[in-house]
Amino acid sequence: MQKVYVTDYEYASLKEEEGEINKINARLIPVQSRTEDEVIANCKDADGLLNQYAPISRKVIENLPNLKAVGRYGVGVNTIDMEAATDHGICVVNVPDYCMDEVSDQAFALIIACMRKVVLLNNQVKNRGWDYKLGKPIHRLRGQKLGLLGFGRIPRSLAEKAKPFGFELLVYDPFVKEDIVKEFGGKLLTLDELLQSADVISIHVPLMKNTEHMISTKEFGMMKKTAIIVNTSRGAIIDESAMIEALQHKQICGAGLDVLETEPVGKDNPLLDMDNVIITPHISWYSEESEVELKQKAARGVAEVLQGKVPTYLVNKAVVGTLSLK
């Protein structure tokens, strides 16, 4: 019987994974590993892995001789050494359409809440106030320029949701062609052009070496003083100290943040005392439906490989030429 180990997990139940793995008469074995050595010790005879946060490094891969597939809970595969996996003929699968609706919904919720100053005014009323002038100025959404950094699945979904509200769409993505952006009624710009033009900027790029602190002092200096920045991607894409300074010096108008550089947020973080900043606890990914779908699809991808099939959501496609998969 083939064995699929869950390297680590925070879920209350693994019934969705069990359902997918049982279909191929394999065995699901949950463990809790935090380090390379723990993964090796706990999963030494694994045919497949389901992985949340534990490191799947070259060392791990070289010490799991039966390993054929690694399924990542999510879109990103930053926990896995992709080069090592490909070198050893191991398929890496993810869930590329995971929480697409949820993140775009959360981003749009933060955009609307910031622009209409919903939290500020709600707090005033609950503190026994009743003065709309506290929210001034508020501008109508129609005609405002929505700048999207990145134009993958999630920001495209956000663009579709924002369109009926009359936003003008601006996009920065060096990997997307202009005609794709035009299909959504948008305009493809350089990063500098977008920063200078947008009324609200929503971040949707992955965290990599070249995107860490992509938005810092220089970039905040380019933005309109009335601009709002929204981040539902990864906290470290924004240089948080630079953002705090920009907010304190009124270089920008406000921020809607579901992610921060350090999570949970520190109790002395100045952002907590700013009325023009909305912070949610990294919840963009979540709905009851998205969690079920994530677990099913990650497990299904591993099961497909163990059945000798090319998996639906294969990340390292170069590995196919070295394997006998249908």
Image (tube, grey):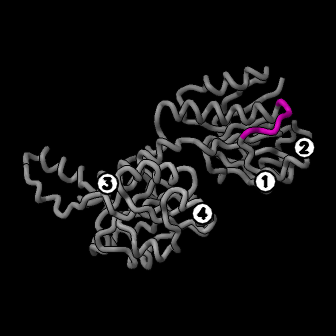
The count of marks equals 4
- Residue type beneath disc 4: Asp
Q: Which residue is mark 1?
A: 58
Residue appearing at x 53%, y 44% in the figure: 100
Of residues 130 and 185, the one drawn nearer to the viewer in this rendering: 185
Q: Which residue is mark 2?
A: 323
- Please state the horizontal and vertical placement of residue 34, each as a whole percent of the image: 63, 44
Whether pointer 4 and pointer 3 mark residues with C-beta atoms closer than 8 Å, the reply is no
User: In the visual, does 69 lie left or right of 190?
Assistant: right
Q: CA distance from mark 1 to mark 2?
A: 19 Å
- Check if residue 213 falls in the magenta segment: no
Residue appearing at x 29%, y 69% in the figure: 226
Q: Report the disc number at residue 179.
A: 4
Q: Secondary structure at mark 2?
A: loop
Q: Secondary structure at mark 3?
A: strand
- Please state the horizontal and vertical placement of residue 98, each as a whole percent of the image: 57, 41
Whether pointer 3 and pointer 1 mark residues with C-beta atoms closer than 8 Å, the reply is no
- Residue type beneath disc 1: Arg
- Please state the horizontal and vertical placement of residue 60, each as a whole percent of the image: 77, 48
In terms of sequence position, does the residue under pointer 1 or pointer 2 come before the other?
1
The magenta stretch spans which residues? Answer: 307-312
Q: CA distance from mark 3 to mark 1?
A: 40 Å
Q: CA distance from mark 4 to mark 3?
A: 34 Å
Q: Main secondary structure of the magenta part?
A: loop
User: In the visual, does 26 lie left or right of 286?
Assistant: right
Whether pointer 4 and pointer 2 mark residues with C-beta atoms closer than 8 Å, the reply is no
- Check if residue 311 falls in the magenta segment: yes
- Residue type beneath disc 3: Ile
Whether pointer 4 and pointer 1 mark residues with C-beta atoms closer than 8 Å, the reply is no
User: In the visual, does 7 lie left or right of 292?
Assistant: right
Q: Which residue is mark 3?
A: 278
In terms of sequence position, does the residue under pointer 4 or pointer 3 come before the other?
4
